[in-house]
Image (spheres, rainbow, N blue to C red):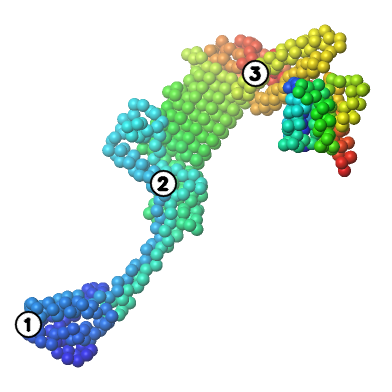
């Protein structure tokens, strides 16, 4: 035997490795001779075959020798050398915040429930909260994760570097590097130094394998129904389909519904556009802080901050419009419409004489406040007069007042002064409200095709009952004298000639006299 | 500016308070007689006192006399129905800086307050 591989036993030994050369196995065929088999010889064989001595397992060699000598078989094999495996690096990982994660879980459960047909039938009771028996109100549970600016979305764990290994022959085994995954977030989510991913905008959270982002617009490609739940969204909402009975869309941004809206509730801090319309069945509601545009409205209660734009029809609806109504080609049949700044309508009422009420030039809430102030002022006036007459009687009855009588007199005068001051403040507030009415109302209504009988029109200071049909274009407005006039068939005449005009204070008529405002009697 | 109103009549205090508020003074404390006022001056430390003359427990003149033993500078205005010249002189001798006879108008009270504060501040400076 000699060192470095030249060994008498070489013909009995064979070295084999795994594909990565991390393990070296020694095969011994001892039948011919086990003489001279010892640790030194085997180690020398391994070294002679380029196995690095530091990776040779001396104990394994001893065990192999013991096995060969103790119970010689045709062949023996044992792993006698071990390299160092490479430890691969770990990629940066994002873990959703537990609260966000649980919301996604709920949405997944909801999807499963829909797929299993568990919510085919709408629940009997449409309560807003989960019941005590843990059932879920699928109307209210929205199928989107909506987050607000500042919410913690996820936590990022940075990548961990790997370490290279070495095979039994001393060759380097390179470790693979973890990915930084820096491109997973867009600008809608901010990564803090502490690894927290914070929402940079309000919106719907989208999580994809290669991208996580927040969109400030919610696009629903189908209907708003049990698949989506009721929508509450801090940005714009675009619904490609319909909005079903009992569902709602509430958005801080613009709302667009391309399909039919049934008996649902719509609300927007901006404008609402219904490409088709709403069949509200007397239960549908719309609140739009800016404009409402729709093909038609039927059985709807709506409050519109600015203008109402209708293409074809308004039927049996109760609408309050802060600006103008633009419905040149539309028929208004039944219901009640109030438009603060008047507007234009195709036709009002119907040949079937459906009762239809139109109010123009009114700001109902402000006018209500003015009426309340008037009632206060009337009461105050009575009170002032009462204290004043008491004071007069008191002063005239006492020739030389005592100290306490002087104080009593001063007290009464003080009360009068205070009441007068309060009256002055109320009059100022009323003036301000009158100014608001004057600035934000217009009593002009243009009708293009017809006004049918059973139509009632309220304009500032008057109620107008149409007892005969007016076919063709007409314009009704308050003339310079404050009396209602109509321009019909090219002639401007007193409205009395075509309708019954009755003085009425349902809509206050604000007039300006020598710079001061007042409500005309 | 902290002002102490000393009058047994709540109505009178309200009238004075109303005038003071119109003048822009909001730090106002009330006392219902001289003794009540003496118990409050230490903590409240007023910059001006309006004092009625006729009050139960301790009248305004006694209050002025007692107050002036320890405080020579804080302006005091007597607001009273006592209109005789001798009474006015008595009050001034006791240490009041100005005198308002009831009934007064808000304008008169406001004028006297402004006048007193101006006079006292010029003396102080």
Q: CA distance from mark 3 to mark 1?
A: 120 Å
The 10 Å Cα crowd at callout 3, few under 14, some 14 to 19, many 20 or more, is: some
Local SS, label 3: helix
Of badges 2 and 3, the one in the foreground is 2
Measuring from the top left, give residue B17's x and y in whole percent.
Answer: 76, 27
In which image quadrant can residue A81 be found? bottom left
Local SS, label 2: helix
Q: Nearer the viewer, residue A267 or A28?
A: A28
Where A497 falls versus B40 (above or below)? Answer: above
Q: Earlier in the sequence, mark 3 or mark 1?
A: 1
**Disc 2: which residue:** A100
Whether residue A342 is visible here, answered yes or no, is no
Residue ID at (80%, 8%): A393
**Disc 1: which residue:** A31
Q: Nearer the viewer, residue A136 or A489?
A: A136
Q: Looking at the figure, which quarter contains the N terminus of chain A? A: bottom left
Chain under disc 3: A
The 10 Å Cα crowd at callout 1, few under 14, some 14 to 19, many 20 or more, is: few
Residue ID at (13%, 78%): A66
């Amino acid at each position: 035997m000699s060192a470095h591989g030249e060994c008498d036993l070489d013909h009995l030994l064979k070295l084999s490795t795994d594909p990565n050369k991390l393990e070296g196995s020694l095969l011994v065929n001892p039948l011919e001779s086990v003489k001279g088999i010892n640790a030194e010889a085997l180690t020398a064989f391994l070294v002679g075959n380029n196995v690095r001595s530091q990776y040779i397992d001396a104990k394994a060699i001893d065990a192999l020798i013991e096995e060969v000598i103790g119970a010689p078989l045709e062949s023996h094999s044992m792993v006698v050398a071990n390299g160092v495996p490479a430890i691969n690096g770990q990629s940066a990982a994002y873990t959703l915040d537990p609260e966000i994660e649980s919301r996604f879980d709920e949405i997944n459960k909801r999807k499963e429930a829909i797929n299993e047909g568990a919510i085919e039938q709408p629940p009997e009771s449409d309560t807003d909260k989960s019941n005590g028996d843990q059932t879920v109100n699928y109307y209210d549970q929205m199928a989107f994760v909506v987050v607000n600016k500042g919410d913690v979305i996820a936590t990022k764990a940075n990548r961990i570097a790997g370490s290279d290994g070495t095979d039994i022959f001393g060759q380097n085994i390179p470790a693979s590097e973890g990915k930084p995954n820096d491109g997973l977030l867009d600008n809608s989510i901010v990564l803090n130094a502490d690894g927290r991913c914070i929402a940079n905008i309000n919106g719907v959270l989208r999580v994809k394998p290669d991208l996580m982002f927040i969109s400030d617009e919610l696009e629903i490609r189908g209907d708003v129904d049990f698949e989506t739940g009721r929508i509450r969204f801090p940005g714009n909402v675009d619904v490609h389909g319909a909005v079903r009975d009992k569902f709602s869309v509430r958005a801080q941004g613009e709302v667009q519904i391309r399909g039919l809206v049934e008996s649902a509730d719509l609300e927007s801090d901006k404008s609402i556009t219904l490409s088709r319309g709403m069949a509200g069945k007397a239960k549908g509601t719309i609140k739009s802080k800016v404009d409402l545009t729709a093909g038609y409205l039927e059985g709807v209660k709506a409050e519109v901050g600015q203008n109402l734009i209708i293409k074809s029809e308004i039927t049996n609806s109760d609408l309050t419009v802060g600006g103008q109504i633009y419905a040149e080609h539309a028929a208004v049949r039944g219901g009640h419409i109030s438009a603060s700044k008047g507007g234009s309508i195709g036709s009002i009422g119907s040949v079937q004489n459906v009762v239809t009420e139109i109010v123009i030039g009114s700001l109902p809430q402000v006018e209500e406040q003015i009426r309340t102030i008037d009632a206060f002022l009337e009461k105050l006036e009575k009170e002032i007069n009462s204290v004043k007459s008491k004071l007069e009687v008191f002063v005239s009855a006492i020739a030389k007042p005592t100290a306490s009588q002087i104080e009593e007199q001063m007290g009464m005068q003080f009360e009068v002064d205070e009441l007068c001051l309060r009256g002055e403040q109320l009059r100022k507030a009323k003036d301000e409200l009158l100014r608001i009415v004057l600035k934000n109302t217009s009593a002009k209504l243009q009708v293009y095709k017809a006004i049918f009988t059973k139509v009632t029109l309220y304009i500032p200071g008057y109620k107008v009952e149409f007892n005969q049909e007016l076919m063709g274009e007409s314009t009704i407005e308050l003339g310079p004298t404050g009396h209602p006039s109509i321009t019909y068939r090219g002639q401007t005449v007193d409205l009395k000639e075509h309708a019954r005009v009755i003085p009425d204070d349902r809509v206050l008529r604000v007039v300006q006299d020598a710079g001061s405002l007042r409500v005309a009697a | 500016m902290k002002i102490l109103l000393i009058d047994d009549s709540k109505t009178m205090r309200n009238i004075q308070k109303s005038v003071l508020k119109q003048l822009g003074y909001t730090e106002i404390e009330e006392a219902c007689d001289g003794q009540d006022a003496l118990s409050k001056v230490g903590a409240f430390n007023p910059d001006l006192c309006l004092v009625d003359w006729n009050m139960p427990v301790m009248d305004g003149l006694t209050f002025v006399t007692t107050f002036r033993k320890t405080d020579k500078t804080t302006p005091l205005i007597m607001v009273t129905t006592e209109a005789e010249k001798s009474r006015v002189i008595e009050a001034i001798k006791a240490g009041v800086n100005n005198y308002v006879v009831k009934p007064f108008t808000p304008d008169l009270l406001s004028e006297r307050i402004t006048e007193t504060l101006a006079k006292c501040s010029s003396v102080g400076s």
